[in-house]
Image (cartoon, coloured by chain):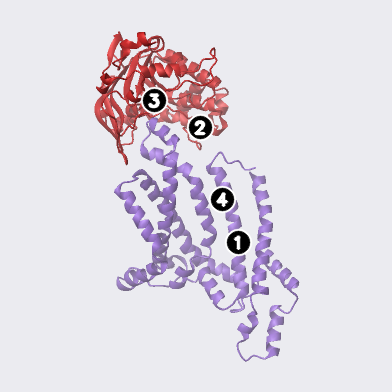
Amino acid sequence: MALLEIKDLSIQFSTDEGVLHAVDNLNLSVDQGKTLCIVGESGCGKSVTARAIMGLLPIPPAKITSGSVVLDTKDLLGLSEKEMRALRGNDIAMIFQDPMTSLNPVLTCGYQIQESLHIHDKITKKEAKEKALALMKQVGIPEAEKRFSEYPHQFSGGMRQRVMIAMALSCKPKLLIADEPTTALDVSIQAQILELLGTLKKSSDMAMIFITHDLGVVAEIADEIIVLYAGTVAERGTTKDIFNHAAHPYTLGLLESVPHISKEQEHLTVIPGTLPDPTDYQPGCRFYERCTFHSDLCKKDPVEEEITPGHRVACFHYRLKDQQY
Amino acid sequence: MLSYIIRRIIQAIPTLFGVTLVTFIVFNVVGGDPVYQMVGKGAGQKEIDALRRELGLDRPLYQQYFFYLKQITTFDFGRSYATKQKISQMIKEGMGPSLSLAVPAFFFGSILGIIISLLVALYRGKLFDRLTVVLSVAGMSVSVLAYIIAGQYYLAYMSGLFPISGWEPGLRGVPFLVLPGLIWVIVSLGSDVRFFRTVMLDEINQDYVRTAYAKGLGKYRVLFRHVLKNAMIPIITRLVIAIPFLYTGSLLLENFFSIPGLGSMSINAINSSDFPVIKAITFIGALLYVGGNIVTDICYALADPRVRLK
């Protein structure tokens, strides 16, 4: 059974320009010990989905209009704020994009790590400190005793992200949501953080939802991938399915736009056009305007079709792919 | 830290020196002759000269200035022209009534302002927030005189809840201080809440607040442990800057409520061209202001670990 199962989730925001459809009828599930990558460009609904799982959407203006988010057997959307608080940082933890601003600048890193221990496990201060120190060592922070009482500004970007990870892991979550945790870091540090997350995940058997727009990162850590476009799923499958047998024109476009070190390129390949206006979606495929394959078929709403077991695509033209490429 | 404080105190000396120069020039050089005012119309030249000699105003300016500097450094400001009392004694006596009104009103008002703005930030956009903003603007817009007159008429004269005015030393003075204190709090609350609210809203949208919520913290813990400590820097700035002004009390409140504090004393001194008194009050004000700035810097370092005093 899946650890987390999202069914038919739709999220809207009311804005001055009208109702913004952030996520439409999203289905996904994550198994214990697996990593699901959610890929897509800015504004496709990745982070909103993560916030919805955490119960951290600002309501209003956000509104969950349909669906369920089930962790184990509990529907998170039906929980009270108090019940949700007991889960947050405990069963589900989250790490954020920018470790520079996501840590509180006026509290010591040690305090920030032990705070969730303090809240969720009823343990003494001394025990919490010992646990926090052990966590700091586990995530690879050298001289943990000394650094325990230091402030975030005394840490480098990579070390800060390690502090964030230690914080998230402190209560041994079943599910870790990582919202672009490497985007703000140097490439060499990125690799270190990804490796750390990989090792930690293996040793603790937790599930991970990894949100990113960086396909290079995805290839390294994903078990399964969901490609989101304009709040809907374009394609989903295993890492192999997506990287070797991509079927959706949008996925193909994303893969094309990754620069290759072996190829000499004058310009980077881009997908022409921009995301459609999320307050004014037309019926039919949302990728229509930017798609090279579009035809009258695409004026109908696409549904996900299974190509091979587990590999699904929401496109009428995926069968044409072999002829076109 | 200690060497920083010492350095800041040394740096303050030129500032204070400048203050003495300015006050001296304003009063002794361009301020007109106090002697004419003191002796009144129809006094003879002999009388005027005698008084001048007595006050030391016949001596060259540089000598007068050194005499003034000597007074300042020994905190012996001479005697008042008007009452012939020793000024240091007058200040000592006036400080009690002033501080007994200003200090409680200031602390109560500031703490209330911080708490209200935290709650407002929590309920942003809700009725409580909007109501507070409207009331703050209304509170800021109405002159303190209106509060004084309305308070004295309705709360003191009509309903007899408080004495209309007056002062007594010790605990017996407390009833006299309630109404002016209340007015002080109301007047300061308006602008304080507006300012603190902006500071809090700025902080509450920061990423670290989201992190704190993601850890499963409740909103009060987030507010008091995480947000308030970050908001302290601008709050400290605003509060510490206000502290030096506490010693002069409120000119208007003391005057209307007949509280014999430094505020009343200043107004009387200005009315009677009592230059030595005004000079003394100005200088002590400047001294406290410079001191307040140093205290602010130290508070920064205590509130924010990123500030290193070097």
Depth check, front residue: A122 or A306: A306
Circle 2 chain:
A
Depth check, front residue: B64 or A160: A160
Pointers 1 and 2 within a single chain: no
Q: Circle 4 sits on which residue?
A: B296
- Pointer 2: residues within 10 angstroms few (<14), some, or many (20+)? some
Q: Position of residue A195 (x, y in %)?
A: 49, 16
Whether residue B300 is visible: yes
Separation of residues labelled 3 and 4 (CA atoms): 39 Å
Pointers 2 and 4 within a single chain: no
Separation of residues labelled 4 and 1 (CA atoms): 15 Å
Side of B152 relative to A66 (left or right): right
The shade of chain B is purple
Q: Position of residue A122 (x, y in %)?
A: 38, 28
Q: Position of residue B63 (x, y in %)?
A: 75, 72
Amino acid tagged 1: Ala
Circle 1 chain:
B
Q: Look at the image and tell me in which quarter the C terminus of chain A lies.
A: top left
Q: Answer whether labels 3 and 4 touch (C-beta < 8 Å).
A: no
Q: Look at the image and tell me in which quarter the N terminus of chain A lies.
A: top left
Chain that is coloured red in the picture: A
* Dot in front, 3 or 4: 3
Amino acid tagged 2: Met
Q: Circle 3 sits on which residue?
A: A93
- Pointer 1: residues within 10 angstroms few (<14), some, or many (20+)? some
Q: Which mark is residue A100?
A: 2
Separation of residues labelled 1 and 2 (CA atoms): 40 Å
Vertical relation: B126 (above or below) B70:
above
